Image: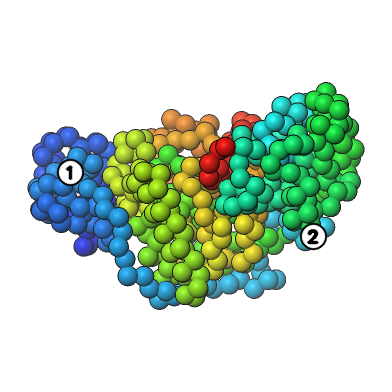
Amino acid sequence: MKNFIRLSEIDNVVTVTAELDSGVEVEQVKTSGLVPCSHKIATAEIRQGEAVRKYAQIIGYASTDIRPGEHVHTHNVDFRNTSADYEFATDLKPVDVVSEPARDTFMGYRRENGKVGTRNYIGILTSVNCSATAARMIASAFGSEEMANYPNVDGVVAFVHGTGCGMAGQGEGFDALQRVLWGYARNPNHAGIVMVGLGCEMNQIDWLLEAYGLKQGPLFKAMNIQDTQGLAKTVETGIEMVRAMLPEANKCQREPCPVSELMVALQCGGSDALSGITANPALGYACDLLVAQGGTAVLAETPEIYGAEHLLTRRACDEKTGEKLIQLIKWWEDYTARNKGSMDNNPSPGNKRGGLTTILEKSLGAAAKGGTTPLNGVYRYAEPVTAKGFTFMDSPGYDPASVTGQIASGCNLVTFTTGRGSAFGSKPSPCVKIATNTEMYTRLIDDMDINAGAMLTEDLSLEEKGSEIYQLLLDVASGRQSKSEAQGLGDYEFVPWQIGATM
């Protein structure tokens, strides 16, 4: 393995693949000091104010003169807001779509509405924080002994949150919460839903049912504590509702389903500078394979494509789709400004220790998760994704909130690349975690499903690692447990994005 990686001939930095002492030769220059693994060094002089380039793109500007061989990071690089001349639909690569008879299959749960689940849960949804305890108590009544009687049911899960009241009854925040609750109620990984409220909250269950045309039936029930005579009666009633659902849910059987029924969330967290070199491009290759099968991939985390959005607009299927993405970028610039923040608030301290200097650098690597196919749709947070192929959903970069939106949008499977390490998991959609480097994969092997770091340490190709990821997605969709799933993660990662004031 070489001690550096050059991503483009026009770059003026390279990424080192091991910690280097002073005086080590790297591409005809010598390091002028200690350089941590996955950090950058300059391969040419970069004068103060000049652009620092990686991925053949600008990732920041020199805050002082930088000499060849010098460590390039936050101490000598400044961030500036992006300023791009956007192009639309100028980089559309044709997709070699696999014909239906030849498509790959997985073993899924076919629902009455035609959607396909990868898991078979009963969910307890709360309209407000005030009913969170009731929901937890209902779910906790169904332990392993009782669930052993229902081998086709993956579990009973409480989805609780900290909002639903003390908020405006209209506007972005209220609409987003209702979309999340509707989306979870309709996610194909749920066989049944019990919705629990308090009764006087701003986020009224009746309003949700009316707004989205939800009807109560054998596998969908709703109640509130005030009308059900208090907490104890509500818990008792909820347990009875779930017990009535379990035999019906257990009747569901896995059957062969085309990969076109998979909707996969593309997520990254705890990133390092190798994320954009190994795991994210490999996941992007798997994304291309999925799209060729007629499936859907959903990229998110709008602040983490900032500085790379111009590359995505070139892949937009038309100008309208590209413009929707640009409007999201403008909303985020305004959102951070009015809250006295900066788009460069991300990367986190851990990201920076992993070699990521600015949000521009992080975004260019993060966008690689989306592969190379056309961008066929751009959606609001938790809005149902209806387009096939590669799509984008607006969300924060905060992983639990972002994945919550993706699952609400219809994702029945989650992928999660990480360089620093993560203990994230999700329900009802299982999460596959992909390590960017071999050292972390070995250290956190109980949490990582795939080692993309082998692309460097074992010289595996992008195609080999991407195909491995794609095959694991089919296996997990068919019932194989991911590492996070086997450890029971996912009960506390339901975090709807709170937009607006708490009043």
Residue at 72%, 32% (x, y): give it: 131
Residue 145, percent across and down? 81, 25
Task: Characterize the local packing of mark 1: few (<14), some (14-19) or many (20 or more) Cα atoms within 10 angstroms.
Answer: some
Quadrant containing the C terminus in the rendered view: top right
* Relative to 276, residue 353 above or below: above
User: In which quadrant of the rendered view does residue 272 lie?
Assistant: top left
* Alpha-carbon span between mark 2 and mark 1: 56 Å
Q: Is residue 9 left or right of residue 442?
A: left
> Element at badge 1?
loop
Which residue type does callout 1 highlight?
A: Asn
* Relative to 319, residue 336 above or below: above
Which one is in front, 21 or 386? 386
Residue 303, percent across and down? 42, 51
* Mark 2 / mark 1, whichever is N-terminal: 1
Which residue type does callout 2 highlight?
A: Asn
Residue at label 1? 76
Quick check: can you spot residue 357?
Answer: yes
Q: Which mark is residue 113?
A: 2
Residue 206, percent across and down? 79, 47
